[in-house]
Image (spheres, rainbow, N blue to C red):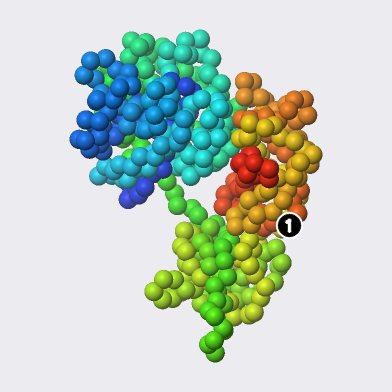
Amino acid sequence: MNAMTDPEFFSAADNGVLRLITAGSVDDGKSTLIGRLLYDSKGVFADQLDAISRAKYKRTVGNTIDLSLLTDGLEAEREQGITIDVAYRYFSTPARKFIIADAPGHEQYTRNMVTGASTADVAVILIDATRVADGQLLTQTKRHSTLAHLLGIRHIVVAVNKMDLVDWSQSAFERIRDAYGVLAAKLGIAGFHILPLSALTGDNVVGKSARTPWYDGPALLELLERLEVRADAPAKAFRFPVQMVARHGGDRADDFRGYMGQVASGSVRVGDRVQIQPSGVTATVKSLVVYGGQVDHAVAGDSITIVLNEDVDASRGDVLVHESAPATVSRQFQADLCWLDTQPLNPARKYLLKHGTRLTSAKIKGVLSRRDIHELGEIPGNEAPFAMNDIGRVELATRDALALDRYDDIPATGAFILIDEATNQTAAAGMVR
């Protein structure tokens, strides 16, 4: 289970930018851990330290700085000592740059955790060592681990926090390691790294601690600096959701018509044969226009305007793909849903479905199964209402045909959200299976 034994986890090359999210249950110390990373890596300005040292909601004793206040910026967060919204922080070391998302632990804010986790490379799952004395992990630890796995987060790092409160007990750490190993096996998590630390005192956060001679792995920051994040989006099939059609006013001889958007995955070159989905019409790429001129090719993440040789009917919501590797066009499919709305799922209602740049109406034909967060098994979908924070497999039907990929293959065209037509609230996050 220890990722230190897997050479694929590490790279000596340019490590680039790492996006990570902290997750776990309430009061596991997520905000304090991020504050400690920022503080010990010199990522905090003097005026920020001065401000939090004078904060009226400081929860530390004496002159000790409450590092959780570096991310808990809302008044309600500081007053209650909880995290409500996702806070993003940025810092860098000589080895790499980091974008950290501090996610809430409360069950009612699971939707915020899903938002922060959707773009993360690494999930740091915190576990309070004082709350797992009997080896039973908390429900939110199980739920956040489940969501991290469903969202395809590449690396799971388990940080056993507050080890100072259990006298740095090796046996307490090993009980938690074994319990999480059972959880990972049930969820299908192939591997994870686990380490003991104290966010409050800084042990094993930025540097190795002498208090854990029995732990031979790296400190958290060293591990995060070395985790490999493979940029595999350019190697996947070409997907280009059209955001808008660009053309001049029509007073010129050259009738310019281009399709603007961002390459979601794969790459495209001048001369490539492409297909417009869902219509299935094919064309040839004439040119690729960017700000300031033209390019011969573009890869995932590039914002471009594609000009085609043929006059075709394409508009916002369509997806350009290579003719040789199309997506699956369908009006009916199965997906995993994480329900985010306070109102339970109502199969009799229609919802708006946002997939890429297309917005269409959708109906949930049935809940096939749901995941029991406590036992981690699948249970029939019709035994109880599908309510907030439930995770399950559903079958959907949409008004318009969609160009779909399995989320595991291409997340950009395998993800969608459901919107409540009446309230305009995001009702669910979905992943095509």
Q: Is residue 160 above or below residue 306?
A: above
For image coordinates 46% across by 42% down, the residue present is: 120
In the picture, measured across the screen, residue 428 lies left or right of residue 161, that is: right
Q: Kindly identify the amino acid type of the residue bearing the numbered disc 1.
A: Asp
In the picture, measured across the screen, residue 373 lies left or right of residue 192, that is: right
Q: To which residue does mark 1 refer? A: 400
Q: Is residue 134 above or below residue 119?
A: above
Question: Would residue 47 be visible to someone looking at this image?
Answer: yes
For image coordinates 55% across by 25% down, the residue present is: 107
Residue 209, image x and y in percent? 26, 22
In the rendered view of the protein, which quadrant contains the C terminus? top right
Depth check, front residue: 197 or 314 = 314
Depth check, front residue: 215 or 341 = 341
For image coordinates 37% across by 10% down, the residue present is: 166
Residue 47, image x and y in percent? 21, 35
CA neighbours of label 1 inside 10 A, class few (<14), some (14 to 19), many (20+)? some
In the picture, measured across the screen, residue 406 lies left or right of residue 268, that is: right
Residue 316, image x and y in percent? 61, 64
Question: Would residue 23 be visible to someone looking at this image?
Answer: no
For image coordinates 32% across by 18% down, the residue present is: 59
